Image (spheres, rainbow, N blue to C red):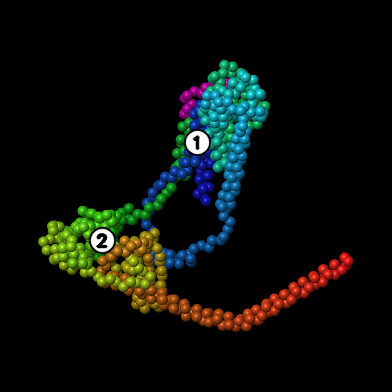
């Protein structure tokens, strides 16, 4: 809501700027046609320029997260200020604004209906591209698009000729469009006094245009001016039309006798440009903060172990991300010769890698069938590909796997498989932790972990963070922060858990896509088991807390049950009293019916 009001205020300010420029610099000039387009373009720019925003990027240092920040994120309710309920004045203002807009719109519709009623079933005469309509009502001549309406009985033939020349200029140049646009802006910006003066300036300038062109076709200019004065007595007109008579007749006559302006005065139109530039720099530049680290360079921590998997459903974007991630770890990892079947599954691919210390290798698959998962692992300086299905070498697929220094194809393919399998053995599938399933991230990067001192243990997505250091965690990527500090954490983590445990869950690490679920992650056995253990210990803490809460609430439940049993006799007694009262009411009703009948009998007896 505030955005709408801010937009209306900015547009109103621009309307005021254009009007003041016209009033102070251009009003007395005879550049009538140029003034027309200046005024119309001013309205268009006033509503469009506030929508144009220039973004200015400001680089700022990334804020450092501390343990206190994590505790505050885990308990937002304690830090949130109390907000008292109050009246939303913006809503009330918007309702008032809408009511006025609605009423003014209805007024314009009423004027249009009145115009069509006036034109309905009237005598029409077509001349050139115009439709002349004769009316009997004492109204001032006016035009509305191609229609020119006048009362011929009020004017002589010579006067009608001057009037028609004037109105034909309005009709030919579509001045009715200008009037309707001005009316529309008056509806939308009714609260801005400048828009009403702006509309008056538009209509007055249109009359100047019609007068200046009509007078060129009339020999007697004085007679034309007398016609203007005569029409003063017939002022009935509709506000949405171009009327031959408008207010300020004196100014029109003065302008007819004004000498044409010097063309050098056209420089005055350029005075609006500095005002628009100032408006943009003052109000239309939005500052956007971007975080930087180490003077704009991003520091990537060296991983101790990496596990990647590429399967038949891998997308081009995912392979691009894999290449970028490994590049940050100092490994040149490239995909090539990728072919897919009609279902979009990969049936042929070649992957090459090369490390900074000279280790290199490649794997290539080519077949009519979708490929099986290809695993890439690195740990403790050993790098290589592995496959969980050695039976691939039985000839069902044309498989080439090699891990040599010069990336030439190996003669003994089975030996190559044994070598890469030995580099990073495939871990067994870890047990599924409670409340966590279908992990779909296909890349695992494990960083250095050290024991914490007297600080709380910090676990990010199941992996302990080193010594409580959370500087390189982006606060925007945190989805949830949980804090545990009780006897259960000491039981689960020993002495290290006495200072509490902070468990951080980042965004988008889990998913339910069927394609993503199929992408298994090759995780080192010890780390995978540790992650599952941490999740199970976390669930154990939650279960212990829930059990204690149930024990604490048990006496309350028993007390409530006893109170319910104690109140049961009272409820039965009240029910019996309600039944007895109902019987009494039915009995009283029957007695009233009997009394009514006796009263009717007595009344009839009195009549007899």
Residue at 23% from the left image edge and 54% from the top image edge = 339
Helix, strand or loop at disc 2?
A: loop
Residue at 61% from the left image edge and 33% from the top image edge = 120
Which of the 4 image quadrants contains residue 511?
bottom left
Q: Nearer the viewer, mark 2 or mark 1?
A: 2
Q: Nearer the viewer, residue 443 or 505?
A: 443
Residue 583 location, x and y as percent? 71, 77
- In the rendered view, tell whether residue 497 sits above or below residue 469: below
Residue 572 belongs to the span the image colors magenta: no
Which of the 4 image quadrants contains residue 191?
top right
Residues at circles 2 and 1 in contact by the CB criterion of under 8 Å: no
Query: Can residue 100 be seen?
Result: yes
- In the rendered view, tell whether residue 22 sits above or below residue 356: above
Residue 47 location, x and y as percent? 49, 41
Residue 414 location, x and y as percent? 14, 65
Residue 224 location, x and y as percent? 60, 20
Name the residue that disc number 1 marks: 42
The C terminus sits in image quarter: bottom right
Which residues lie in the magenta part? 253-268
Residue 258 belongs to the span the image colors magenta: yes
Name the residue that disc number 2 marks: 311
Q: Nearer the viewer, residue 579 or 164?
A: 579
Helix, strand or loop at disc 1?
A: helix
């Amino acid at each position: 809501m505030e955005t709408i009001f801010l937009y209306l205020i900015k547009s109103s300010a621009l309307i005021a700027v254009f009007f003041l420029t016209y009033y102070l610099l251009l009003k007395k000039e005879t550049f009538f046609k140029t003034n027309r387009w200046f005024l119309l373009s001013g309205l268009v720019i006033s509503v469009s320029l506030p929508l144009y925003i220039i973004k200015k990027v400001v680089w700022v240092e990334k804020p450092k997260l501390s343990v206190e920040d994590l505790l505050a994120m885990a308990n937002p309710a304690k830090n949130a200020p109390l907000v008292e309920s109050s009246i939303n004045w913006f809503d009330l203002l918007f309702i008032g604004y809408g009511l006025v807009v609605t009423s003014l719109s209805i007024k314009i519709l009423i004027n249009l209906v009145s115009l069509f009623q006036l034109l309905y079933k009237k005598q029409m005469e077509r001349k050139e591209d115009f439709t002349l309509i004769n009316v009997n009502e004492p109204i001032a001549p006016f035009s509305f698009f191609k229609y020119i309406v006048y009362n011929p009985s009020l004017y002589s033939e010579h006067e009608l000729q001057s009037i028609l020349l004037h109105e034909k200029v309005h009709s030919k140049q579509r001045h009715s469009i200008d009037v309707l646009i001005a009316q529309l802006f008056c509806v939308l910006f009714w609260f801005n006094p400048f828009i009403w003066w702006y509309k008056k300036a538009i209509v007055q300038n249109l009359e100047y245009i019609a007068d200046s062109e009509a007078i060129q076709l009339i020999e007697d200019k004085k007679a034309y001016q007398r016609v203007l004065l005569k029409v003063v007595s017939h002022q009935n007109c509709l506000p949405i039309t171009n009327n031959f008579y408008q207010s300020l007749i004196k100014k029109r006559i003065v302008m007819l006798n004004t000498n044409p302006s010097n063309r050098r005065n056209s420089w005055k139109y350029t005075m609006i440009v500095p005002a628009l530039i100032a408006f943009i720099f003052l109000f239309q530049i939005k500052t956007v903060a971007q975080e930087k680290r180490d003077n704009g360079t991003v520091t990537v921590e060296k991983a101790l172990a990496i596990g990647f998997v590429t399967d038949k459903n891998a997308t081009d974007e995912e392979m691009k991300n894999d290449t970028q991630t490994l590049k940050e770890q100092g490994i040149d990892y490239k995909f090539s010769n990728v072919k897919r079947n009609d279902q979009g599954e990969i049936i042929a691919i070649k992957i090459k890698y090369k490390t900074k210390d000279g280790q290199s290798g490649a794997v290539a698959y080519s077949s009519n069938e979708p490929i099986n998962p290809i695993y890439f692992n690195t740990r403790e300086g050993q790098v290589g590909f592995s496959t969980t299905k050695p039976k691939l070498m039985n000839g069902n697929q044309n498989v080439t796997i090699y891990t040599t220094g010069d990336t030439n194809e190996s003669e003994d393919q089975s030996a190559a498989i044994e070598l890469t399998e030995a580099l990073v053995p495939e871990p067994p599938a870890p047990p599924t932790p409670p409340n966590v399933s279908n992990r779909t991230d296909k890349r695992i990067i494990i960083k250095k972990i050290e024991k914490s001192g007297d600080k709380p243990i910090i676990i990010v997505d199941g992996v302990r963070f080193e010594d409580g250091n959370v500087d390189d965690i982006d606060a925007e990527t945190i989805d949830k922060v949980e804090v545990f500090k009780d006897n259960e954490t000491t039981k689960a983590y020993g002495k290290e858990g006495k200072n509490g445990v902070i468990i951080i869950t980042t965004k988008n690490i889990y998913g339910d896509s069927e394609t993503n679920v199929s992408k298994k992650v090759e995780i080192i056995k010890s780390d995978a088991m540790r992650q599952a253990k941490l999740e199970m210990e976390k669930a154990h803490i939650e279960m212990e807390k829930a059990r204690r809460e149930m024990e604490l609430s048990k006496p309350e439940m028993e007390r409530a049950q006893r109170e319910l049993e104690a109140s049961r006799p009272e409820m039965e007694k009240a029910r019996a009293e309600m039944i007895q009262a109902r019987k009494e009411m039915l009995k009283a009703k029957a007695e009233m019916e009997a009394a009514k009948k006796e009263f009717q009998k007595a009344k009839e007896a009195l009549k007899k």
